[in-house]
Image (cartoon, coloured by chain):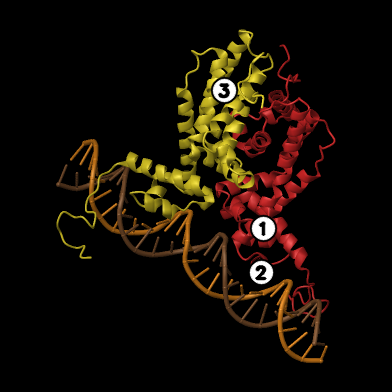
Chain colours: A yellow, B red, C brown, D orange
DNA sequence: CCCTTTATGTACCTTGGGGTTAATTTGTCA
DNA sequence: TGACAAATTAACCCCAAGGTACATAAAGGG
């Protein structure tokens, strides 16, 4: 009460700084969480506005409408994940170790990027409508494929990899279990128990997946798991 | 115009049959498509009502509220898919052929059940909240695991399968690529092209997946694919 | 210093859509 | 045959939430 006293002007904001970039980032940050949590139609603009340090008005000022905000969020998480992929350097590793590293990194990246996973799930529900509209996302996707193609080429040249091995298929395969591991955890655990997500079990699972892929790619590969006799 | 003439009573429905079960089925059928297409918050009750041969009021009469309808839809698709799994009989096949068959059937089942896939995606967005509440779904999930456990036991007993092979992990793995293949088709194609979904390519992909799993499960398995020399 | 552009706050508008009320018809069983 | 429950219709309610109008303060330049 009694908000009308003069003083240093606490209650009624009589002055504020202009900081467009910070405001944009703030909105995008909160919106990412809300869209990831509730989906496009489920997210609430008023709720997003409430959590930011700015007002609903600014959301519309910077992003036009709800779909514009969603699109910006989507592009943001894609950019973040692809940047992480770019940081991964396997050029110095020999082919088998490099491939192992790429699979493990992809698996871990998915585990530690739940927002990304959820937004991709949501985007698939919308048949990738917004991803298709994006001008920036298509440019981001070469990096991981390039790396895999390089590793495959080196592996084949060294006579280590089977001739039919395909980088795109390998990426698809690696993505499939890495993505599913996070995306479908809730329903899988509910249906079949959460043993596979128990302490230590994820690492063992990853080891088996890596073994499995390597066994199908590398000629004469000796698996490390699923081979225990009893 | 002129809807008030007596006649056989076309305009104003002066008579209707009671058929609760048909009405329920009708609503559930339309609602399944709508929830699968737009998600829980995205689906529109008025639109569902419009497409049924009954009225919105009946939706609330039979299902209580939107969430009740969604829950019924979810249970419906689970029951349908699990029933299909029950029909699959591999007890008569020798272990390797049986496992091959189970993987192929799972893959195909996912391809031909897009509503199920989408509803599971949606349910995962909701952290399996409604699946957990379900009284009937948990009972449906034993069948596929039982089959896999039987095959694994027979395979191990015959000295064909590695000792570490685990039915739950196998199911997880088979589900992962089968599910991802459908669920993430839109974003994957947008990001990396739709080569893997082109004519004939899916069958080749499945063959490689089966090979890969069998190679990691069956001792001394000779793969059929990815082994072409050039 | 004033004028323009950019950025921000406050208050408001509009409607889509989830949910309900009340009345009517159908079927059934004493 | 008439009361009662179950099924159905039509019309209505109402508020959450996406979006906008308007005023105004900051920044920058001439």
Quadrant of res B95: top right
Question: Horizontally, is B142 left or right of A87 in the view?
Answer: right
Q: Chain of mark 3?
A: A
**Seen from this angle, which residue lies furthest right?**
B92
Q: Are marks 3 and 2 on the same chain?
A: no
Q: Identify the residue at image location x=64%, y=13%.
A: A161
In front of the other: B27 or B125: B125
In front of the other: A146 or A72: A146
Which residue lies under the disc numbered 1?
B72
Residue A152 in sight from this viewpoint: yes
Which residue lies under the disc numbered 2?
B61
Which residue lies under the disc numbered 3?
A145
Q: Chain of mark 2?
A: B
Q: Secondary structure at mark 2?
A: helix
Cα separation between marks 1 and 3: 42 Å
Q: Residues within 10 Å of mark 1 (few under 14, many from 20)?
A: some
């Amino acid at each position: 009460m009694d908000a009308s006293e003069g003083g240093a002007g606490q209650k009624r904001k009589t002055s504020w700084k202009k900081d467009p970039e910070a405001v944009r980032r703030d909105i995008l940050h909160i919106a990412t969480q809300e869209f990831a949590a509730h989906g496009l139609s489920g997210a609430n603009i008023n709720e997003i506005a409430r959590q930011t340090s700015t007002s609903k008005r600014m959301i519309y000022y910077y992003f036009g409408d709800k779909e514009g905000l969603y699109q910006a969020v989507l592009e943001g998480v894609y950019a973040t994940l692809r940047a992480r992929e770019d940081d991964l350097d396997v050029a110095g590793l020999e082919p088998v170790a490099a491939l192992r590293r790429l699979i493990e990194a992809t698996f871990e990246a998915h585990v530690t990027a739940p927002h990304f996973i959820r937004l991709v799930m949501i985007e698939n529900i919308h048949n990738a409508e917004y991803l298709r509209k994006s001008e920036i996302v298509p440019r981001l996707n070469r990096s991981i494929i390039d790396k895999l193609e390089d590793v495959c080429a080196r592996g084949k040249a060294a006579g280590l990899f089977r001739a039919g091995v395909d980088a795109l298929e390998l990426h698809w395969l690696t993505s499939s279990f890495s993505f599913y591991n996070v995306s479908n955890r809730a329903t899988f655990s509910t249906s079949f128990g959460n043993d596979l997500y128990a302490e230590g079990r994820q690492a063992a699972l990853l080891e088996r997946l890596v073994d499995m892929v390597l066994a199908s790619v590398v000629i004469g590969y000796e698996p490390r798991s699923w081979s225990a006799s009893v």
